[in-house]
Amino acid sequence: MSRQLWNKGFQPDEMIERFTVGQDRELDLRLARYDVQGSLAHIRMLCSIGLLTQEELDLLVPALEDILADIEKGEFVIEDGVEDVHSQVEFLLTNRLGDVGKKIHSGRSRNDQVLVDLKLFFRDELVTISNAVQSLFDRLISLSEEHKDKLMPGYTHLQVAMPSSLGLWFGAYAESLTDDMQLLVAAYNIANQNPLGSAAGYGSSFPLDREMTTELLGFANPHYNVVAAQMSRGKTERAVAVAVAAIAATLGHLAMDVCMWMCNNFAFVSFPDELTTGSSIMPHKKNPDVFEIMRGKCNRLQALPNELALLTANLPLGYNRDLQLMKDIVFPATTELIDCLQMATYMLGEIRVKDNILDDPRYDYIFTVEDVNRLVLEGMPFRDAYRTVGMAVQEGRYKPTRSVNHTHLGSIGNPANEQITAKMERLRQHLR
């Protein structure tokens, strides 16, 4: 038998219910703790405005805390026939407390209830993602410091160009993550607003104290306009999606580099045998399967903003059931990104870096710019120095000096890791 909060005495068609509910029961388990947290704040507010007595509040609070304890222990389930997490919590309360359990919905709609759950969920997910980003960032900065004096080729058009260093390479991805953290912070700020009290999107005739629930739930501020609160469904998810996609782009680029640098034609980095895979017929193969899978997953994650934009593109004002489908898209995506970040951090902890890469004669021409600059510093005009070195290359007379003297901020000799670390720390403070 189906049990819905909106039941009006008739049973919905079973096929219709199955189609409209979809994966909600499974996905809603991730929202359960937040649903209880929202209800605890809501009933305390209801008591403060006289819609619950103190005696009723004293019954409801420990009952909800018991449900929360079951959730934390993994013992909470959404029973067959129960539509969603909101219904399950209310039915549990009603079974335990009788009619007082039915009072927790006063002044709420499922619209603002699920909005609160999602805001709290995304807020926590973004902090978890930021922690995973920080771990990868720390690993990259550590590797940058460790290998800052080890030269490697820099490329343009995938052609050997100028000297770079492994320190610069690792550090570049660390600083790129600070840009992604900016987007995480922006998404967090959008999620960190309280929609509770907007009801179905048009407010309530009850004298709700929305500032009180904002404070109890730790939000920065309410969504003040109740229609704007309802409109935030979809906007929050899109902000999260943009941040996820940006991190995925950085991580996917890193994975591509590792795949390339592991190739025998480069051989700049390697990993222990147990972290690679082999071939079914070629005994010599050590394949970068982890980074190939990571690259594929991150490429897929970059489609997230577009998928959500298409889902919500032509929706009219107010709640529409299409919005339910966003959970199917975003919930697995945040989990997958966290998995990729953690795997990247783990793998880079075992990376092996080749020494003396530029001793190979194939990289002789990488020093031409250094030699042009040396002649300029000795007093030769730049165009003459360029022509002098260029003619030596064309005529086969060029002999590289193999010395690199980069000292400016952010260069081989001065990768600015302290400043990059300070930048990340400033950004992280907005998520605490």
Image (cartoon, rainbow, N blue to C red):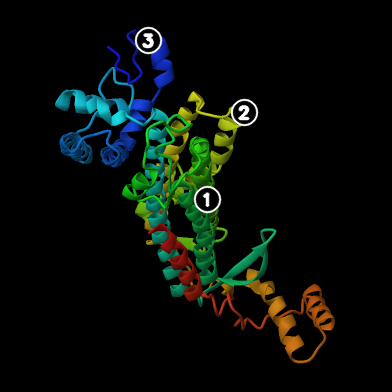
Please indicate, yes or no, whether residue 426 appears anywhere in the rendered image.
Answer: yes
Q: Residues within 10 Å of mark 2 (few under 14, many from 20)?
A: few
Q: Element at badge 1?
A: helix
Compared with 311, 14 (above or below) is above
**Element under disc 2:** loop
Between label 2 and label 1, give the one nearer the viewer. 2
Residue where numbered disc 1 is placed:
252
- State if disc 3 and disc 2 touch (CB < 8 Å): no
Report x, y in % for residue 374: 71, 86
In the image, taking residue 74 as reference, residue 7 lies left or right, namely right
Mark positioned earlier in the residue sequence (2 or 3): 3
Q: Disc 2 designates what residue? A: 314
128 or 61, which is in the foreground? 61
Q: Residues within 10 Å of mark 1 (few under 14, many from 20)?
A: many
User: Distance between the Cα atoms at labels 1 and 3?
Assistant: 46 Å
Left/right placement of residue 114 relative to residue 177 reads: left
Camera-side mark, 1 or 3: 3
Q: In this rendered view, identify the residue nearer to me: 171 or 209.
A: 209
Q: Is residue 276 above or below residue 317?
A: below
- Name the foreground residue: 395 vs 250: 250
Can you tell which quarter of the image residue 22 is in? top left
Q: Quadrant of the C terminus?
A: bottom left
The residue positioned 23% from the left and 37% from the top of the image is 71
Element under label 3?
Answer: loop
Dot 2 amino acid type: Asn
Quarter in which the N terminus is drawn = top left
Residue depicted at 25% across the width and 22% down the height: 79
Looking at the image, residue 320 lies above or below residue 134: above
Residue identifier under label 3: 12
- Residue 224 placed where, x, y %? 48, 44
